[in-house]
Structure formats: C-alpha cells, structure tokens
Image: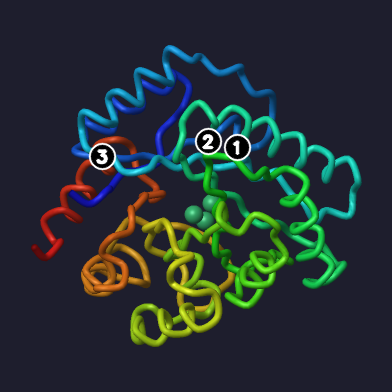
Amino acid sequence: MRAVGCHLSVSKGYLAMGKQALAIQGNTFQFFTRNPRGGQSKPIDMADANALLELMRANDFGPILAHAPYTLNPCSQDQKVRAFAQLVFEEDLEKLEALPGTYYNFHPGSHVGTGVEVGIQQIVNLLNKVMFKEQKTIILLETMSGKGTEVGSQFEELKAIIDGCLYKDHIGVCLDTCHIYDAGYDIVNDLDGVLAHFDAVVGLDRLKAIHLNDSKNPFKSHKDRHEKLGQGYIGEDAFKKFINHPKLRHLPLYLETPNELDGYAAEIKWIRENTMK
Ligand code: FE
Ligand code: FE
Ligand code: ZN
C-alpha cells in the first residue's frame, strides 16, 4: 500500500507517533527532529526507536521523514548561524542512524543578499562536511517557494547542490506541491510539463518524497502559505491527477496542511479513496 501520512509531534516519542499514524490510517509520518525554531535536541532513546521500527515492519510502513528545524541556514552571512546549521545537521544525522532508511528533509537555505551562487556553494560545503559514506539516512532538499532570498525554488539550483555533493547516493529531493506552485511551476494546468522539466534538470530518480499541500495563494506568489487539500488554489481536481500520476504513484505522501489530527485523518481517507487501483 502507498505510504501516506502527516506531520506529527515528536513530544511523546517515536513509538507514540507510529501509533498515532496508524490510528488515522497512515503508514508513514513526518516529524521535526527538534523544536522547528531551533533549540536543544534530546538524546535518542534506543528502546523507543526500536519499538517504532518494529511497529513499522508489522504495519507495512513507508520511510518516515525527519524535518530539520527552519532556523537551519547553511548560507547565512552570520558565521554563528552557519556553525549552528552544521551542529544541528551533525547531531541529527548521528541520531537518525538509529532509524535506518529515514529521510532527512531540509530547506536548503536563504542567502540573504550574497546571491544564489554563493548560497549554493555554502550549502554544498555544509553537506560535504556532515555527510558520510556509510550513512543510512537519505538527505532530501526541499523544493522552496522562492520567498525572500530562498535557495531551491528553481530545479536548476537543486541540481547544482546535488552536483557539488560528494556522496550522491545519499541525496534526493522532496517536492512540496504548495511550494512549487508558488515558485511558478504550474502543476494545475501542466503537470506533465513540470515533471518532464524536473526529469530533464534533476532526474526523476532523485525524487523521493512529496509534501502534499494546497496553497492559500495564487500561482507564482512566492508566499509559502499551506492550505487544506482542495481548499486552495491548487484544488481537488489537480490533486486527484497528481496523486495518480504514473510517474509519482510510488512516492510517499506527507501532509503538512493546517489541520489537527481529525483533519489529517479525513485527508488521508480522501487520498486513499481517490487513488486509482
Ligand atoms: Fe519544509
Ligand atoms: Fe514542505
Ligand atoms: Zn511550506
């Protein structure tokens, strides 16, 4: 069965998230590795991690997705912020070795005026410091909306980061539907064209995960405001085509829509009911 899930809180531990996912008919989930605005990370509880792995095996889970904090910015002009990004990345990658096969998704960064090229180089530098040959985690670059000076709103930028990376086996892309629509890729009227473009620039084999979100703002707004599925500018029909597209059907879906657990349950149900057999 296709892996579908939503964003959950890590506050009660790993096994608790697995149980919560199951309770809403999910078979994967996303969580923040620590407070999204930064902060300390707790040491890993191996018994809890192993209990989650057991639950995942027993219930046909897809890979889970760990999301880095928003404050992680490898291309800040502030050396302290860059050092923090490295520290967080190192700690998170070390912890995630306890959950082999997990995806680690991060926002590539905001260059805040130095320009996209310098930004890309700084992101590459960080990745080449923190990644290691034997790591069991796949790092995902998230497609961004292009708000402010965000790097990663154009497929070419993601490709340049991947090209600079030493350990290409451990890197991929997470496509956020709200973000790419906001960035100016028209997945409503030309999904085939967008996917062909992604394939030509990055390669569809690099695409590992989908953040499934509608958008509160019209096409190409560069605002990054998520909406519930079918209630935004992307709309229900486009999502039906999106989730059933032959080039995307195998990919895990993670909801980051503005919902509580019951709202997520309804969206997961909608996805399962609208998935063509
Ligand atoms: Fe994100
Ligand atoms: Fe996202
Ligand atoms: Zn977003």
Residue 111 is left or right of residue 226, and the answer is: right
Q: Quick one: SS at disc 3?
A: loop
Q: Earlier in the sequence, mark 3 or mark 2?
A: 3
Q: Percent x, y for residue 233?
A: 37, 72
Alpha-carbon neighbours of circle 1 within 10 Å: few (<14), some, or many (≥20)? Answer: some
Q: Percent x, y for residue 8?
A: 40, 34
Question: Label 2 near label 1: C-beta < 8 Å?
Answer: yes
Amino acid found under the numbered disc labelled 2:
Phe
Q: Quick one: SS at disc 1?
A: loop
Amino acid found under the numbered disc labelled 1:
Pro
Q: Nearer the viewer, mark 1 or mark 2?
A: 2
Alpha-carbon neighbours of circle 2 within 10 Å: few (<14), some, or many (≥20)? Answer: many
Residue, disc 2? 32
Q: Nearer the viewer, mark 3 or mark 1?
A: 3
Question: Label 1 near label 3: C-beta < 8 Å?
Answer: no
Q: Quick one: SS at disc 2?
A: strand
Disc number placed over residue 27 in the picture, else none = 3
Residue 58 is left or right of residue 116, and the answer is: left
Q: How far apart are marks 3 and 1 (CA)?
A: 23 Å
Quadrant that contains the C terminus = bottom left
Q: Nearer the viewer, residue 187 or 83?
A: 83
Q: Distance between the residues labelled 3 and 2?
A: 17 Å
**Residue at coordinates 43% horizontally, 21% vertically from top-left?**
49
**Residue at coordinates 78% horizontally, 46% vertically from top-left?**
129
**Residue at coordinates 15% horizontally, 53% vertically from top-left?**
272
